[in-house]
Image (tube, grey):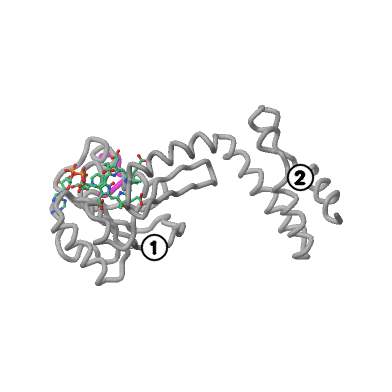
Amino acid sequence: MTVYLPIMLDCRGKHCIVVGGGKVAERKTLGLLEAGAAVTIISPALTPQLAELSDSASVVWLNRNYAPGDARGAFLVYAATDDRAVNEEVAREADSLGVPVNVGSHAEAGSFITPGMLRRGRLTVAVSTSGAGPGITAGIMKLMEEMLGEEYEAYLDFIYEMRQEIKRRERSPEVRKRLLKRLGTLNVLDEIREGAFTAWDSEQIEIWIAQHREE
Ligand SMILES: C[C@@]1(CC(=O)O)c2cc3[nH]c(cc4nc(cc5[nH]c(cc(n2)[C@H]1CCC(=O)O)[C@@](C)(CC(=O)O)[C@@H]5CCC(=O)O)C(CC(=O)O)=C4CCC(=O)O)c(CCC(=O)O)c3CC(=O)O
Ligand SMILES: NC(=O)C1=CN([C@@H]2O[C@H](COP(=O)(O)OP(=O)(O)OC[C@H]3O[C@@H](n4cnc5c(N)ncnc54)[C@H](O)[C@@H]3O)[C@@H](O)[C@H]2O)C=CC1
């Protein structure tokens, strides 16, 4: 069994290539665009949604088959055609260039796989079965959706602001650690769920820090 390393990649503005223009290519492209990547699709055909993205210049479309040399200069490559041999050729080229490559038709030919994803603002949950069962992954994502509601978005915005303030105001690692630990015990999630939460202003934050920094 391959043990995959999960990481979170900053893809903003990065040149990413999707080879193929079907359903699988569409899903990978939408994920890339959500992460701010600059996407080029190489395929003689596109799904209606990918065609729309091309028309609105949200992606660059090269209306042709994959050709050797296409992977050059890419940050990531997705081989998402329905032709295993083509996908393998794309993977070989990307590998030889040291570019990470995903192969939709048979995961083991590539160097990374795509997890199921759930986003709640700053929170990202990524789930993988190491390729064993993508349908099971989709089912687990449904459970995650129920478990982690929309309130997590506002919650993490709050935690982010507080943590920035604490880091800005407190020099001592010990005090910071204490405050950050305390921050995690605040019952803000329930308040957000009940609609009773209003974001703290800087005075409230200052008071809270002063109250808890010596505990
Ligand atoms: C290894 C991996 C490589 C990769 O694509 O990165 C891979 C590979 C393959 N998928 C196949 C089939 C299906 N994949 C889905 C759906 C998803 N597949 C995704 C990821 C992954 N799929 C990676 C592993 C993830 C993990 O570790 O768990 C998700 C999570 C994310 C995404 O794609 O964005 C997304 C869920 C999105 C959501 O939340 O809905 C469905 C269901 C559907 O389409 O509705 C089916 C049909 C049902 C079935 O077969 O289970 C086949 C067989 C093709 C054939 O039969 O020829 C292969 C090839 C192989 O087995 O190697
Ligand atoms: N990883 C995953 O999540 C899943 C993977 N699959 C696998 O992925 C493959 C693709 O699935 P779909 O997108 O549904 O197929 P599809 O048939 O909808 O799309 C295939 C696309 O590849 C393009 N293409 C074919 N040859 C090409 C070439 N030489 N160069 C560039 N583009 C080329 C076609 O024009 C088409 O746009 C399937 O054959 C299957 O093995 C299927 C379901 C899910």
Q: Is residue 58 left or right of residue 156?
A: left
Query: In the drawing, does residue 82 fall left or right of residue 188?
Result: left
Q: Was residue 56 drawn as part of the magenta stretch in this picture?
A: yes
Q: Where in the figure is residue 122, as x and y percent of width and height?
A: 54, 46
Residue 145 drawn at (x, y percent):
48, 36
The residue type indicated by label 1 comes to: Val
Residue located at (30% from left, 70% from top): 98
- Whole-angstrom CA distance, mark 1 to mark 2, is 45 Å
Residue for badge 2? 202
Residue shown at the point (26%, 49%) measured from the top left: 60
Measured along the vertical axis of the image, is residue 193 above or below residue 46? Answer: above
Residue at position x 14%, y 47% from top?
44
The residue that disc 1 covers is 3
Q: Position of residue 100 (x, y in %)?
A: 32, 64
Residue 32 colored in magenta in the image: no
N-terminal label among 1 and 2 = 1
- Residues rendered magenta in the picture: 55-60
Of residues 49 and 135, the one nearer the viewer is 135
Q: Residue drawn 32% across and 56% down?
A: 16
Which element carries disc 2, helix, strand or loop?
helix
**Residue found at the very far front of the displayed protein:** 1
Callout 1: CB less than 8 Å from ligand 1 = no
